[in-house]
Amino acid sequence: MNVNERKELIRRNTEEVLTEEELEDFLKNNERLKHYIGFEISGKIHIGTGLMCMLKVKDFLEAGVDC
């Protein structure tokens, strides 16, 4: 998987990301990336909450990010 494909997976359905330049540099230099998912629960939790979270974890894993 090339740098652009990895970057797209990491950015897909995300609210905040490092700057584009930082992310691309990390990916080009094969830096070890880790992710963090934070929750601010302001209403009832539903199945979509867990589903969307795990879909993002799947994207990270496919892009080579440590979970």
Image (cartoon, helix red, strand yellow):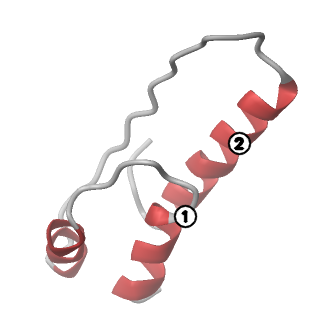
Q: Secondary structure at mark 1?
A: loop
Q: Position of residue 53 (x, y in %)?
A: 64, 38
Q: Position of residue 4 (x, y in %)?
A: 40, 86
For label 2, the crowd category at 10 Å Cα-Cα, with few meaning under 14, some 14 to 19 and many 20 or more, is: few
Q: Name the quarter where the C terminus is drawn.
A: top left
Q: Amino acid at mark 1?
A: Arg
Q: Position of residue 51 (x, y in %)?
A: 77, 38
How far separated are the C-alphas under marks 2 and 1? Answer: 11 Å
Disc 2 residue type (three-letter): Met
Q: Is residue 18 left or right of residue 11?
A: left
Residue at figure coordinates x 49%, y 52% from the top left: 14
Is the residue marked by circle 1 packed among few (<14), some (14-19), or many (20+) residues within 10 Å? few
Query: Can you tell which quarter of the image residue 48 is in?
Result: top right
Location of residue 43 with respect to 17 vertically, above or below: above
The dot on residue 47 is none
Q: Residue at x 37, y 42 (%)?
A: 35
Disc 2 secondary structure class: helix
Identify the image quadrant of residue 26: bottom left
Tag count: 2
The residue identified by callout 2 is 52
Q: Quadrant of residue 28?
A: bottom left
The residue lying at 36 percent from left, 49 percent from top is 16
- Above or below, 28 against 65 in this view is below
Residue with the mark numbered 1: 12
